[in-house]
Image (tube, grey):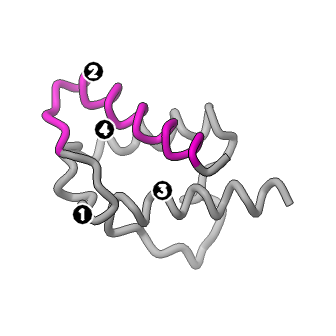
């Protein structure tokens, strides 16, 4: 399922970037989220759509959550949350 989560996240980043007319940077695991090409509204849209498609929202699920710094951190956060939700 991890590959599917990664694919879903990349797809949402690409779709939202196109809809919001943002130039999306290469989405490597080391890419800082602040350099991805999305603004705060676009990130909010991505998170809302990921909640719809994956059924999880890590940002509302934990008070101890540290905001992800890189794209890889963002994906790992969703993979971990999904794993916890299904076990």
Q: Quadrant of the C terminus?
A: bottom right
The residue where tag 1 is placed is 32
Whole-angstrom CA distance, mark 2 to mark 3, is 21 Å
Category of crowding for the residue at label 4, using alpha-carbon neighbours closer than 10 angstroms: few (below 14), some (14–19), many (at least 20): some
Binning the other alpha carbons within 10 Å of mark 2 as few (below 14), some (14 to 19) or many (20 upward) gives few
Secondary element type, mark 1:
loop
Residue depicted at x 16% and y 32%: 22
Can you say whether 35 is above or below 48 in the image? Answer: below
Which dot, 4 or 1, sits closer to the camera?
A: 1
- Say which residue appears at 54% left-offset and 73% top-offset: 65
- In the image shown, does 4 or 84 lie closer to the viewer? 4
Residue picked out by circle 4: 42
Q: Secondary structure at mark 4?
A: helix
In space, the residues marked 4 and 3 are separated at their CA atoms by: 16 Å
Q: Residue 55 appears at what percent x and percent y? A: 69, 41
**Is label 3 in a helix, a strand or a loop?**
helix
- Asked if the magenta segment contains residue 7, the reply would be yes
Please give the range of residues in magenta: 3-25
Residue located beneath label 2 in the image: 19
Could you give the CA–CA distance between mark 1 and mark 2, rounded to whole angstroms? 21 Å
Q: Position of residue 5 (x, y in %)?
A: 57, 44
**Sequence-wise, which precedes: disc 4 or disc 3?**
4
| Mark 3 lies on residue | 75
Direction bottom: furthest residue: 64
Q: CA distance from mark 1 to mark 3?
A: 12 Å
Q: Residue at x 42, y 66 (%)?
A: 73
Question: Measured from the top left, where is residue 19 in percent x and y?
Answer: 27, 20
The image quadrant of residue 54 is: top right
């Amino acid at each position: 399922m991890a590959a599917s989560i990664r694919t879903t996240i990349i797809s949402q980043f690409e779709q939202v970037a196109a809809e919001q007319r943002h130039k999306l940077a290469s989405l490597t695991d080391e890419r800082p989220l602040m350099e991805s090409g999305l603004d705060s509204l676009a990130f909010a849209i991505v998170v809302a759509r990921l909640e719809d498609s994956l059924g999880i929202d890590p940002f509302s699920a934990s008070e101890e959550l540290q905001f992800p710094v890189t794209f890889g951190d963002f994906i790992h956060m969703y993979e971990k949350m999904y794993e916890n939700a299904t076990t």
